[in-house]
Image: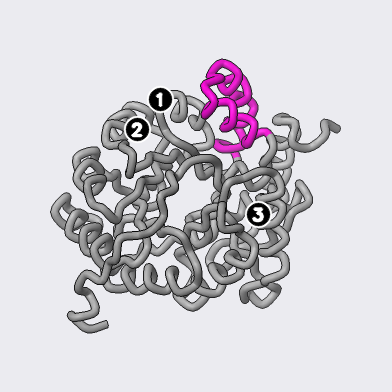
């Protein structure tokens, strides 16, 4: 990419939709040789949407984004576009370690039919990712992206926290429509929420604190637990968004272990094992990730049974 290609090409997006509701961060399915597998990917997406979800995120953390090349990201976005309806959201993770590559992925996402992009902060050169560096990165991406941008706060994988000050600054950009906060730190979330406006939405990505996040003002959720417990997760978010906060809090309780003891504890291999157990298509992760061993699978199965997702033995 040349220097001229980094210059802003942004044309104000036409969508007037507010990002809200419940989305699933789809897993990426692979065949025995480790290549993309379309049929199980499509089956999963259809099942997620049939359960009443409001959209899909592809190439996110749950989708093993760090293990996908740019062509594969385009491919799964195109596959998802065939399934996700125009009134639903199709988000694509486009974050990378380089600003140029992130911008290129945003353009790819546009070409493949996405509605918006989710951008995790670069973090390989962690000690140099100052506030100034992160702002320069996000501004360049937001200026050049042909799609609306969401910031992505994911300390578990990026090993840094987007500051409330950075979020407030970027929330003023006319091509930044929101953020996904997966940290589950409610006091910090409350600071992010003060940046929320008619054009900037805060979405939680923490399955263990989702009801509390929505009660505080988050407009929706992108939750890994929706991959293998879609109906109870949908019920919780619906109640929370409707203001039925006591009901939502009660529905949250059995879902907390699904987040902490599966998604957080085991990452994509755990998500995929749980999906296999509930009759969806998880399959094996891509190297260097390994499938769960027998003891780990037994733990996942136990959590699913205790939460009522699988029948008790």
Q: Which mark is on residue 272?
A: 3
Q: State the extent of the magenta-drawn residues as a range.
A: 232-261
Task: Identify the mark nearer the N-term, 3 or 1.
Answer: 1
Quadrant position of the C terminus in the picture:
top right
Mark closer to the observer (1, 2): 1
Do the numbered discs 3 and 2 sit on residues whose CB atoms are within 8 Å?
Answer: no
Task: Identify the mark nearer the N-term, 1 or 2.
Answer: 2
Question: What sort of colour scheme is used for the picture?
Answer: one colour
Please tell me which residue is depicted at 16% across the width and 50% down the height of the picture: 131
Q: Is residue 130 left or right of residue 252?
A: left
Q: CA distance from mark 3 to mark 1?
A: 31 Å
Q: Dot 2, crowdedness within 10 Å: few (<14), some or many (≥20)?
A: many
Secondary structure beneath label 2: helix
Q: Which mark is on residue 312?
A: none
Please tell me which residue is depicted at 43% across the width and 42% down the height of the picture: 182
Please tell me which residue is depicted at 68% across the width and 64% down the height of the picture: 42
Q: Is residue 120 left or right of residue 137?
A: right
Q: Dot 1, crowdedness within 10 Å: few (<14), some or many (≥20)?
A: some
Mark closer to the observer (3, 2): 2
Q: Is residue 253 magenta?
A: yes
Q: CA distance from mark 3 to mark 2?
A: 28 Å
Q: Is residue 74 magenta?
A: no
Do the numbered discs 1 and 2 sit on residues whose CB atoms are within 8 Å?
Answer: yes
According to the picture, the residue beneath numbered tag 2 turns out to be: 189
Pick out the residue farthest to the left.
Answer: 132
According to the picture, the residue beneath numbered tag 1 turns out to be: 216
Q: Is residue 9 above or below residue 226?
A: below
| Residue 160, position as x, y percentages in the image | 29, 47
- Quick one: 298 or 70, which is closer to the camera? 70
Secondary structure beneath label 1: helix
Secondary structure beneath label 3: helix
């Amino acid at each position: 990419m040349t220097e001229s290609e980094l210059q802003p090409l942004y044309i104000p997006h036409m969508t007037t939709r507010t990002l809200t509701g419940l989305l699933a961060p789809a897993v990426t399915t692979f065949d025995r040789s480790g290549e993309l597998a379309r049929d199980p990917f499509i089956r999963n997406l259809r099942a997620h949407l049939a359960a009443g979800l409001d959209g899909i995120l592809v190439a996110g953390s749950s989708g093993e984004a760090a293990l996908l090349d740019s062509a594969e990201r385009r491919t799964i976005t195109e596959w998802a576009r065939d399934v996700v309806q125009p009134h639903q959201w199709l988000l694509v993770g486009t974050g990378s370690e380089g600003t140029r590559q992130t911008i290129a992925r945003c353009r790819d996402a546009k070409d493949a039919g996405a509605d918006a992009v989710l951008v995790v902060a670069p973090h390989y050169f962690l000690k140099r990712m100052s506030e100034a560096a992160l702002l320069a990165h996000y501004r360049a991406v937001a200026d050049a992206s042909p799609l609306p941008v969401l910031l992505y706060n994911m300390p578990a994988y990026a090993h840094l926290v987007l500051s409330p000050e950075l979020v407030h600054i970027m929330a003023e950009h006319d091509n930044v429509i929101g953020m996904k906060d997966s940290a589950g730190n409610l006091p910090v979330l409350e600071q992010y929420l003060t940046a929320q406006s008619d054009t900037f939405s805060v979405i939680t990505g923490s399955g263990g604190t989702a009801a509390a996040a929505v009660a505080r003002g988050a407009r929706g959720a992108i939750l890994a637990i929706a991959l293998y417990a879609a109906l109870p997760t949908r019920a919780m978010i619906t109640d929370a968004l409707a203001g039925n906060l006591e009901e939502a809090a009660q529905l949250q309780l059995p879902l907390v272990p699904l987040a902490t003891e599966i998604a957080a504890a085991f990452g994509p291999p755990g998500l995929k094992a749980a999906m296999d157990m509930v009759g969806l298509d998880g399959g094996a992760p891509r190297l260097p990730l390994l499938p769960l061993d027998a003891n780990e699978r037994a733990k996942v199965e136990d959590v699913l049974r205790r939460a009522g997702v699988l029948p008790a033995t």
